[in-house]
Amino acid sequence: MTTLTSLKKMVIAATLAITLCVAASIPTAEPETRTSYIVQGASFDAVLAAVGEFDVEVTHELGIIRAVAVNLTEPEADRLRNHPAVRRLYGNNAVAAAGKGGGKKSPPPEEEPSEEEMPGDGYSEFPSLVDADLLHDQGIDGWGVTIAIVDSGIYSGPGISQDRYGFDRLKAVYDATIDYEYVEGGKGKSKIDFAEIDIDESGHGSHVAGVATSGKLSNVGKYNGIAPAARIVAVKVFDAEGRGTYADVIRGVDWVVENRQSLQIEVLNMSLSAPPQSHYWDDPLNQAVMAAWNDGIVVVVSAGNSGPDAQSIGVPGNVPYVITVGAMTDSYTPAVGSDDRLATFSAAGPTYEGFVKPEIVAPGGHIMASMEGTDKIATDYPDFYLGANFFQMSGTSQATAVVSGIAALILQMEPGISPDAVKCKIMKGARPALDENGNLAYSIFQQGAGMVNAHDAVFDWTHDCANNGLDIEADIAGTKHFGGRANQDANGNYYLMGLDGYLWSNSGVDSNGYLWSNGYLWSNGYLWADGYLWTDGRVDANGYLWSDGYLWSNGYLWTNGYLWTNGYLWTNGLTETMSINTWVDQE
């Protein structure tokens, strides 16, 4: 016998079944795809208000370039692109660093080894290659100078969390990927003990920090970094795979500039690179980097590991103001100078705007520095993990850290000098590679002024040889942009307009070694490092205007590049990439 309750249950079940069938028969709309964009306006407040008119998520506030990052559908992007308060829309997406290999998992970190157990001959003793060790003996070790390292994070490895005197060196740690600043203290939910910090899953950031600042191990004095008493501010912008976004990196630079005064940041190390997509002044990361330089921070960036061909300099290395660094190697014989050479992976200039890049080169072959054995790079390349949390790595990333350390040494000796003055001193102290006849062994588009020398840079008192003819404030404002002297002739050779003796056929890099000497006489000083007004922001018949009124009627004759439609490659669907420099073989 069916009860009333049972009957009610049967009716409810039948109703639910009918409802489910009807619901299943109704087509469901697919959610619209959203893509991350960087939206830039005439002012930060104006662009924020413009974006506020839409029901969209703001993921990054990028005041340093008057922009925000937001997730937009295609119709929303089209509407914002035509908004009167919006200047430009840039794509924003992540990319993995290329060249990562596989391999077995590294052994766990060992205890600090004895001197006999440490790696010895065959590993680059880079401080002695640039005469930084001579300065350490005089107490010139970066004391009182803070270097901000925008990279994959940091951990409390050998010589990183404490300086050569045993003092804590980490002043601040910021994760730009999640917009979170760690607070020193060791207790509480929001606090962390900087002496035990570990927010570097990649290992790249810790390695770079070790090259720039590592204090010597207690029993192995020769493994100092370049500025072993300098302080560190660590800014995380990359994940374990070395991936980040333009917005993450720009937010990291923005945070550095915002906190420059309170943290006394004087040097910014950026061992990262991306392919150029436009003129240097239109790239949003370059705009942030120029703002940092204009705010008084010495910005040191890598040329990139995409060499050796011409015009392979990456972003932000193509910014004319900053110090762009290529790499050399000692060929595993640090005591023998005659076989030193340019690293084959080191990117070369000129830039598409005609600037000579890199400005200098520094040791970047088989550099030994701190990295945890469990970090991604160490586990991907276990053959180069040396034990005791040390790792051997090559790249312009490491060369860049060397120069950041030298900038700290200079600023210890001459506190408060401008970034332009620091750049000038570093270039003046550099030593070009020469052949047996005293001629340049490499083009200036490959080696710039030559290999950096810390001792000569610190004790050179010239301040006015870099960035002459440029106007960074006008460049940032968009009222003036600049070009360099480099051009290309009809035969494909690169040369400097108005200067003789600097012809380069893009012949690559051979395996011969050369002496890096300071005996070379640069004709006309460093005029090739100057800038001249770019007349209309494009390459066309109006061309290029020298400061003395000479009109280069045909503009730049680039035969293998500069194919950007209307001067840019920023398109609706393009994703702008950013990552740590790609892995390269040891040299």
Image (spheres, rainbow, N blue to C red):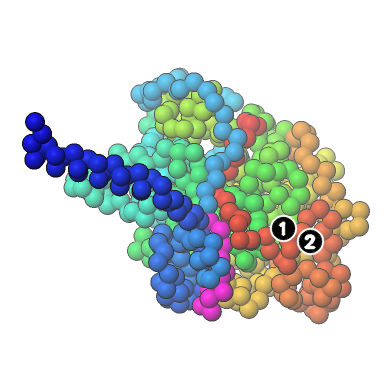
**CB atoms of marks 2 and 1 within 8 Å:** yes
Dot 2 falls on a residue whose secondary structure is strand
Q: Nearer the viewer, residue 497 or 335?
A: 497
Q: In this orientation, does residue 569 appear? A: yes
Q: Nearer the viewer, residue 352 or 442?
A: 352
Q: Residue at x 8, y 40 (%)?
A: 4
Q: Residue at x 35, y 39 (%)?
A: 198
In this rendering, position of residue 344 left or right of residue 473: right
Count the marks. 2
Q: Nearer the viewer, residue 555 or 513?
A: 555
Q: Which residue is mark 1?
A: 351
Which percent across, then down, holds residue 62? 45, 65
- Screen quadrant of the N terminus: top left
- The region drawn magenta spans 81-92
Badge number at residue 486: 2
Which percent across, then down, holds residue 408? 48, 54
User: How far, Cα to Cα, is label 2 from label 1?
Assistant: 8 Å
